[in-house]
Image: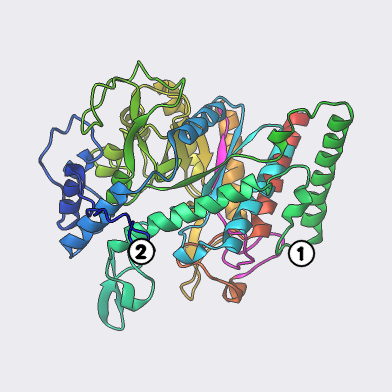
Amino acid sequence: MSANGSTGEHVSAPKLSKAGLAAAELKLANGHLDKTDASAWSPSSWTTKPIKQDVTYSDKAAVEKALAKLERLPPIVTPTEIAKLKKSLREVALGNAFLLQGGDCAELFDYCEENAIESKIKLLLQMSLVLIWGMNKPVVRVARMAGQFAKPRSNPMEMHNGVEIHSFRGDNINGYSIEERTPDPSRLVAAYFHSASTLNYMRASLASGIADLHSPLDWGLGHVQDPNIKAKYQGIVESISESLRFMRTVGADSNANSLETVDLYTSHEGLLLEYEQSLTRRLKHPAGIRRPDKPEQGGETEGGGDGDSKGWYNTSAHFLWIGDRTRQLDGAHVEFFRGLENPVGIKVGPTMEGNELVRLLDVVNPNKETGKVTLITRYGEGKVEGLLGDHIEAVKKSGHVVVWQCDPMHGNTRSTPTGIKTRQFSSIFHELSSALRIHKEHRSFLGGVHLELTGEAVTECVGGSEGLTDEDLSLNYTSYCDPRLNEKQALELMFLIAAHYRVAQST
């Protein structure tokens, strides 16, 4: 060993796989590469399909270097974790649990720090506690964290002082400052390390007892000063604490470990397929997950001859979703998603036809696995009444058993007269309450809610009990993308959902 600690062995630069080379070639062109058999799936078969929301780079060597590095790095999440989430989502699809998914619209690399991570963890814990109290069901917690960097844009370019420049598309593509707007492939590698660091701290916090139900008051209410919200939350905490004391007294708390931590999974929109491909690995199924019903898929294998003992897992996150702008049946994103073992989401907007939705489900989930697909509806308060019922009926007739999740945020975005994007709290709640009612009318049930939120005291969405108006937006508007619920508004929404279920249970 040399004096500097090196073994003296030369470590060669990582070589890019054939699949990676295909992705790199696409990133330097427009359109798709018409090279391979479109019927056979592989992590790179998406490169043969038309793609929306694509990013092109100017430096071929830099793209290949970034993708080669990503292919060499270890998984961020494991198949065991993915399979555990998949099992939980099956229970959600069957009506035995509820899915709470939330986090930033678009993460920034700067959010990878202790306070920002902890505030979102605590908020999701508080929200889930309110839901459990109101619904008497387990809650599956999925964070829009540790990878939710990229955002689709209406236009990849914008004008600045009379000059056309790249739009800001997320920290994993380019920077917000004008000087950093050129897409930079090295940011893909930076996104990996920021995601891994965020998830590492999430795991460490949970392992250290941040989610211990024996002390939920330690989670605090952060910036919430409203006495009514505080009183409601403290009442729930006291009720739970009294139940735990009773269990301890009668000796029914022998499985105390289950009260000291929770599972918290990560998710993001699978937008940058070159990144997702690089972290999609052929790995062994966890014990009990062998899938004899699933035909062997094509593409590169690791050693071959492994039958159904392995599958293609995207290891960048536990859960990925296809956005409303990239869900084309013949498109690259649907092609990529159809080969993954991960549970996946599909955003369902007002332009989705019922037959198109069923065809999407058939492509992404041909074996009709219960709960593998989460349908994330995002219509807008004025359109949910005319669309959701037909979509529910179409899916019921198809035989697919999905998780129905309401995203009441994206269909209710508006701009103020001064051009600031915001959302009205009453519109968010109205779409959510309409979804609850419509599902009941169609003998279905809403399985989850999908929210853009932060644990900070931002002023980005107007309304709610604190009565924020358009004039208040400038007080603390920090989002670089879409407006988020603050801690108080998010908890207030959970109390409204909990109240709905409390009333339903009493009638």
- The residue that appears at 28% across and 42% down in the rendered structure is 328
Residue on which disc 1 sits: 225
Quadrant where the image shows the N terminus: bottom left
In whole angstroms, how far apart are the C-alphas of marks 1 and 2?
A: 58 Å
Which residue in the rendered view is the most extreme toward the bottom? Answer: 161
Q: Secondary structure at mark 2?
A: loop
Please state which amino acid type lies under the numbered disc 2. Ala
Write the start and end of the magenta stretch as one range. Answer: 444-469
**Can residue 472 be seen in this snapshot?**
yes
> Which one is nearer the viewer's eye here, 248 or 400?
248
Find residue 216 and name its label: none
> Which one is nearer the viewer's eye here, 319 or 438?
319
* First along the sequence among labels 1 and 2: 2
**Can residue 451 be seen in this snapshot?**
no
- Residue 355 lies in quadrant: top left
Measuring from the top left, give residue 280's x and y in whole percent. Answer: 32, 40
Q: Secondary structure at mark 1?
A: loop
Please state which amino acid type lies under the numbered disc 1. Gln
Residue on which disc 2 sits: 3
Measuring from the top left, give residue 40's x and y in whole percent. Answer: 19, 30
Residue 210, above or below 435: below
Determine if the magenta segment contains residue 92. Answer: no
- Horizontal side of 305 relative to 383 (left or right) equals left
- Horizontal side of 337 relative to 219 (left or right) equals left
- Horizontal side of 252 relative to 67 (left or right) equals right
- The residue that appears at 28% across and 64% down in the rendered structure is 156
Q: Magenta region's main secondary structure? A: loop
